[in-house]
Image (cartoon, grey):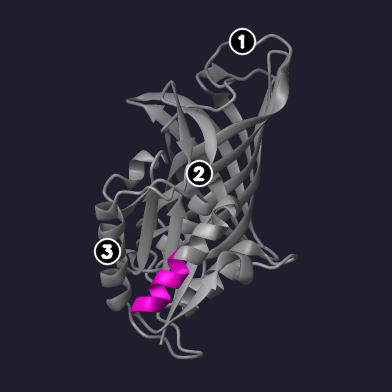
Amino acid sequence: MKRIFIGSSSEAKAEVERVAKFLQSVSEVKIDPWFEVFQPGDWTFKKIEHEAREVSGAIFLATPDDRASQKNKLVNLPRTNVMLEFGYFAAIMEHNRIALCKYDGAELPSDLDGFNFIEMGELGSEKIDKSTIDNAHRSLSQWVNNLPDVSEGISLVQPLHVYSGKYRLKSVFKKWRDISLGKNDCVHIDGHLCLILSKDGMSGGGWVYGELSVDVKGCVTRFRLADEITDAFFNAQGKLTIESLMHYRQRVEPIKGEKPQEDGFEPNLSGPRKFKWSLTPTFAERLILKGEYKNTSGEKVISQAKVTLSRL
């Protein structure tokens, strides 16, 4: 039997049920909808890692949930936690076992340009063009029929590197958005990093999420953030290199004081911005990775921070 996880925003629960009903009409499948998998008190990323090892495939519904500014225009983005879950599954499973269903009006991150997705038409509309429905059903049917069957207790996922896991993230910037920070300035991130690293340590992925606190030249505010880890690997010197892409910045606290510049203080920070991390492992009571990360434009450093990752 095939077992399929379906992820979506809370607003799209009815669409999850419609997709599940169609899948069960074309194949013998067991559906794991997100609202039955995740229970109050669960550690979400641990639950995702377990689920990704147990299912044949995963479907994510990219619906136009949240209004945001991107490249100086207003767009509708899929819910952040849905894209976080999508990225975490993609880091663990083969891409051909993941289906991304895109609904009209949903703007996908630019780094997914090469990812094949299924056009689903307008969310909740009873007037969707028949050819759109037929094409979506045909694509979903072909996808599910190519999935492997699962057996209880047997994982379809390869073993991971011992450094894979969840880390507490603390970073302190010495330069942020092209502002060199003085002794009275403070910009820092407090959050978590979830890393999935191949057994040989030569490739990986994952997500970063948390809060960015800014106190620059008397201007104070705070952002919620989420970044995607697009690659991770060990170099010849034993250092861990991580490459990440800014996915989401949303201001969650009103600005206090006068802004020193416009860049960096918008309600939704624009991107994409790429960061490169260089980390050295140390061992005390638990694994700790220390180093720095940078965002550059050519040879110019735009942002730079000291980073500490503590294994949880």
Q: Is residue 61 above or below residue 263?
A: below
Residue shown at 72%/22% (left/top)? 254
Measured Cα–Cα span from mark 1 to mark 3: 51 Å
Q: Which residue is mark 2?
A: 227
Quadrant of the rendering where the N terminus is positioned: bottom left
Q: Is residue 246 above or below residue 6?
A: above
Measured Cα–Cα span from mark 3 to mark 2: 30 Å
Nearer the N terminus, badge 2 or badge 1?
Answer: 2
Q: Which residues are magenta?
A: 19-26
Would you call the spot at circle 1 few (<14 residues within 10 Å), some (14-19), or many (20 or more)? Answer: few
Residue shown at 33%/64% (left/top)? 95
Q: Nearer the viewer, residue 284 or 271?
A: 271
Q: Which residue is mark 3?
A: 139
Q: Nearer the viewer, residue 308 or 192?
A: 192
| Front of the two marks 1 and 3 | 3
Q: Which residue is mark 1?
A: 260
Measured Cα–Cα span from mark 2 to mark 1: 25 Å
